[in-house]
């Protein structure tokens, strides 16, 4: 199994006048333009086998809650009173913003997922802690079978069983590497490969561009498992049956055949489900339709596994006498069926959520989420900078040099931390974060491209620029997160 992974909505406060302006940088003489209240998100976005990631550009240093969400500081209310002449304003200015938490921007730790085993083709391979539990289970079960086939091994049978468990997961790794190589061939980034409970996962961060590529990406994994099964079968021919090599080769042949057949079942999150998705996508022209069809088939498959696997075992259809299938074996078969069914059902649901996420990602556009900004020089007192911002209806400050080149961004959390009576003596340069290359964002970015840029350089604010290099405004990571949650809450 492997894991893959519109029209922008107007930003609150963006009117027709703003859309006609070439930039978002506002001089102090501009008329104040009120921003309507922004909704506060009610919960985090969800993010299976098909995974991409929810937006994690940076911790939300600065947010803009509803006025009624929490009481404002007295200083903030006084600054607002001088501008509007009333306490209940229709919008919040920069001085009124209250951060959820004032933390220093930092790069979050990347996804790990266990013990790093290597980086084939530049992709990290991790062994999850759950693998050791499964390896112990395989060693115990296969050791019991060896006791009947090769009783002369004694306790050494468990060493042979452990070798089988490692060799089996090496075969699973080859299956996942097939997906990875195909993804890299199509220039799709692969975050990692993880060997875990009941198999492996190749985390492909982008979706294939065409249904044909999606089909190939899904099919190469089971194809490699079938090839391995064939190779182990050929290797068995010169080996004497009933020996340790013969038993190991037979076990690896059967296990790879089972992996191939199981993954070809037509339901997400299995590879066969992705192949079905590609077929429906090709027929309808809509990837979302393919995902919905394959996900519901996956859920039906989960129910079938839950009910059918114990019945097949009980009837003796899987190779054991029906009379022997009682007691502990029946319980273990039912437990295995329940675990498999849960994995398939959960993966199908995750596939639907990720498809919905990707459907709404184009709504995240840097241009519509950008806050209006006022340029100020580094020695400008904070009180004067806030006065200019309030007069212009802006909600961000950009520190520029004498030629107007942007140097840094004044952090909203730092502004709130300065008492009003000290603001005339505090220069904006002392509250600013120096701009790095990763903190300059094109106003044309949207969707996954925008999230990739924000993930590459986590920060609380970013400078948004036009293609000409002209300042367009400031993008807050908190605004992106809120817009994402709002988009995900809308029905598909």
Image (cartoon, grey):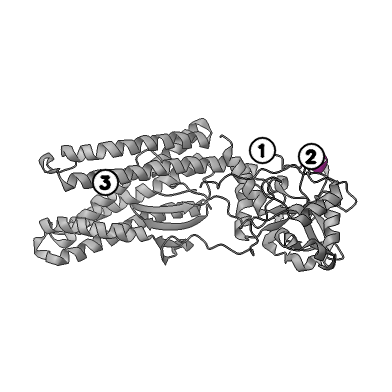
Residue pointed to by mark 3:
335
x, y (%) of residue 174? 36, 56
Q: At numbered mark 3, what does the secondary structure look like: helix, strand or loop?
A: helix
* Vertical side of 227 occupied by 273: above or below: above
x, y (%) of residue 326? 14, 43
- Is 38 in the magenta? no
Other-residue count near label 1 (Cα within 10 Å), few / some / many at <14 / 14–19 / ≥20: few
**Circle on res. 366:** none
Q: Residue furthest top?
A: 284
Q: Nearer the viewer, mark 1 or mark 3?
A: 3
Along the viewing direction, whichever of 456 and 185 lies nearer the viewer = 456
Residue drawn at (25%, 40%), measured in percent from left and top?
Answer: 309
x, y (%) of residue 420? 80, 61
Along the viewing direction, whichever of 69 and 345 lies nearer the viewer = 69
Q: Earlier in the sequence, mark 2 or mark 3?
A: 2
Residues rendered magenta in the picture: 14-19
Residue drawn at (75%, 65%), measured in percent from left and top?
Answer: 431
Residue pointed to by mark 2:
15
Q: How many marks?
A: 3
**Circle on res. 7:** 1
* Vertical side of 282 occupied by 91: above or below: below
Would you identify the image quadrant in which residue 161 lies?
Answer: bottom left
Between the C-alphas of marks 2 and 3, the distance is: 59 Å
- Is 17 in the magenta? yes
Other-residue count near label 3 (Cα within 10 Å), few / some / many at <14 / 14–19 / ≥20: some
């Amino acid at each position: 199994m492997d894991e893959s992974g519109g029209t922008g909505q107007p930003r609150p406060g963006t009117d027709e006048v703003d859309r006609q302006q070439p930039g978002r940088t506002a001089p102090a003489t501009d008329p104040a333009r009120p921003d309507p209240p922004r909704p506060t998100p009610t919960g985090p976005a969800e993010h299976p086998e098909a995974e991409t990631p929810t937006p994690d550009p940076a911790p939300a240093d600065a947010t803009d809650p509803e006025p009624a969400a929490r009481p404002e500081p007295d200083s903030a209310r006084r600054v607002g009173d001088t501008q509007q002449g009333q306490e209940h304003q229709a919008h919040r200015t920069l001085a009124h913003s209250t951060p959820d938490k004032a933390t220093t921007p930092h790069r979050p730790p990347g996804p790990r997922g266990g013990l790093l085993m290597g980086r084939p083709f530049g992709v990290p391979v991790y062994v999850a802690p759950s693998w050791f539990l499964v390896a112990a289970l395989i060693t115990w079960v296969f050791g019991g079978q060896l006791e009947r086939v090769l009783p002369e091994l004694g306790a050494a049978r468990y060493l042979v069983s452990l070798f089988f468990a490692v060799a089996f997961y090496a075969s699973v790794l080859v299956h996942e590497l097939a997906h990875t190589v195909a993804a890299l061939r199509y220039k799709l980034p692969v975050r990692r490969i993880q060997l875990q409970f009941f198999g492996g996962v190749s985390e492909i961060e982008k979706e294939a561009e065409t249904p044909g590529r999606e089909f190939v990406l899904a099919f190469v994994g089971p194809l490699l498992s079938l090839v391995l099964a064939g190779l182990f079968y050929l290797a068995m021919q010169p080996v004497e049956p009933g020996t340790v090599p013969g038993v190991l080769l037979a076990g690896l042949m059967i296990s790879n055949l089972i992996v191939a057949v199981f993954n070809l079942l037509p339901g997400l999150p299995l590879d066969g489900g992705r192949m079905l998705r590609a077929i429906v996508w090709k027929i309808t022209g809509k990837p979302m339709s393919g995902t919905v069809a394959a996900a519901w088939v996956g859920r039906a498959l989960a129910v079938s596994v839950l009910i059918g696997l114990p019945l097949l075992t009980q009837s003796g259809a899987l190779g054991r006498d029906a009379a022997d299938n009682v007691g502990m074996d029946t319980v273990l078969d039912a437990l295995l069926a329940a675990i498999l069914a849960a994995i398939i059902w959960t993966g199908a649901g995750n596939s639907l959520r990720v498809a919905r996420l990707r459907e709404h990602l184009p709504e995240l556009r840097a241009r519509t989420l950008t806050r209006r900004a006022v340029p100020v020089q580094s020695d400008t007192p904070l009180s004067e900078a806030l006065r200019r911002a309030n007069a212009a209806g802006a909600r961000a400050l950009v520190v520029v040099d004498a030629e107007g080149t942007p140097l840094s961004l004044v952090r909203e959390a730092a502004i709130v931390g300065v008492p009003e009576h000290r603001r005339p003596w505090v220069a904006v340069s002392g509250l600013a974060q120096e701009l790095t290359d990763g903190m300059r964002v094109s106003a044309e970015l949207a969707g996954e491209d925008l999230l990739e840029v924000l993930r590459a350089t986590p920060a609380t604010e970013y400078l948004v620029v036009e293609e000409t290099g002209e300042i367009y405004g400031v993008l807050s990571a908190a605004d992106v997160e809120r817009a994402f949650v709002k988009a995900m809450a809308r029905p598909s």
